[in-house]
Structures are given as C-alpha cells and as structure tokens.
Image (cartoon, grey):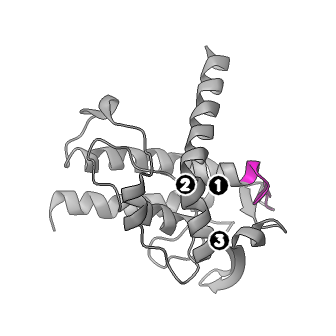
Amino acid sequence: MTELEKTKRAYDYINKLAQGIDPLTDTTLQQDTALNNDRLSRCFQYVAEILQQVIRNGGAVGRRNQDKKLDFTLTEAMKSRLAFSEKPIPVSELVKRINETITDEQMKYLTLTPITTWLVEKGFLDEGTDAKNKRVKFTNGQSVTIGITSEVRTGQYGQYTVILYTKEAQQFVADNLNGMLEDHHREKERQKTLVD
C-alpha cells in the first residue's frame, strides 16, 4: 500500500469518526463513548480536512495551491455522471458519490455541512440535542415529502437511528445543490463580516 493510499484510508476513518460513525463497523458510535464527544468530533473534522488537503496535493503536506482551488459547483456534466443509489443511503455516502464526479483537480471537494444546514433551514430536517447534549439532526413530516427517512438499526453498542436519502431525495439534493452552496457561502461571508 502506498503512502497516498494509507492517507486516503486514514481520511476515511477520521471522517467517519467526525460523523459519529465507527469506521470499522459503519455503525453509529454509542453516545457514552469518548469518541462521540462534540469537541473530539470537531477535532476529527479538522484532521479530516487536513488529510483531504494532503490527498489533493498528491501526498504532499501543506496548502500548495489550496488558495487557488475553485469552489465546488455541480455542473450538468458532473450531474450526468452521478450514480444515484436505488437503496436509501446516508448523506455521507451521497457526498462521496458527488465528489467522485469531480474531474477538475482545482475544484474543492463537497462536504455534507452545506446540504444538512440547508435542509434544516428549509424545514426538511430538524435539529436538536440528544441526552448527552450533542447536536443531532432528525426527520420530520416535511422530510418524507422529498424522500428523507429514518431507520432504527441495531449495532454492537445497541440501537441507533440513521437518516437515509432515497433515490428521490438524492435527486432533490442534486437539483438544489448549487443553491445550497450559494446560501452556505453567503452565510459564511455574513459570519466573517460579523467577526471583522
């Protein structure tokens, strides 16, 4: 296995941990495990972003050409290559499939934050806190109108709920993705001006 392949595997593991998923079993981490702590989750996300930069740089450490990267945009050509799943999938899998359509090495990868934030803002998902005071998203009456469902599963640590996107929901996200990204960038700019 090459160093770049090892880095890609490390990215996959850390990215799953950042999302509260056990990278070895693909099940949701128990709420009472230290790995499911909000602060650690943010740390995992940060490390995943750095690993992603290293992967984009062909294994080189640093931000080489990072400032020149183009913001992610889903073009019609990319959309035509997007492989929707007939089986409902989590948003992380949908983002992975969308990123697989990128052919321009200068384009940034998509993350799931703009998608889930937009869905919460538009009322297609709700957001709250669980018993451990961790922020979680969950479905509501509007979710089903676009094909977002939830399912209770049992893993090695007990029961957990997973949010799933049917083929219709995957198509809905693809159709609205560029608007989601515009809203996300606008909000980031607004937050930046508040800090300055």
Q: Residue at x 81, y 62 (%)?
A: 131
Q: Is residue 38 magenta?
A: no
Three-letter amino acid code at the position of disc 1 = Thr
- Tell me which numbered mark, 1 or 3, is placed earlier along the sequence: 3
Are circles 2 and 3 on residues that touch, CB within 8 Å? no
Q: Secondary structure at mark 3?
A: loop
Considering only vertical position in the picture, is 32 above or below 160? Answer: above
Q: Position of residue 157 (x, y in %)?
A: 63, 80
Q: Which residue is mark 3?
A: 30
- Tell me which numbered mark, 2 or 3, is placed earlier along the sequence: 3
Please identify the quarter of the rendering in which residue 173 is found.
Answer: bottom right
Q: Which residue is mark 2?
A: 112
Decide which of 136, 37 is in the foreground and name it: 136
**Magenta stretch in the rendered image:** 120-130
Disc nearest the viewer among 1 and 3: 1
Considering only vertical position in the picture, is 146 above or below 119? Answer: below
Are circles 2 and 1 on residues that touch, CB within 8 Å? yes
Does residue 191 appear in this view? yes
Three-letter amino acid code at the position of disc 2 = Leu
Q: Residue at x 59, y 84 (%)?
A: 156
How many neighbours does mark 1 have within 10 angstroms: few (below 14), some (14-19), or many (20 or more)?
some
Q: Which residue is mark 1?
A: 116
Q: Residue furthest top?
A: 196
> Separation of disc 2 and disc 3 at Cα?
21 Å
Q: Position of residue 190 (x, y in %)?
A: 65, 25
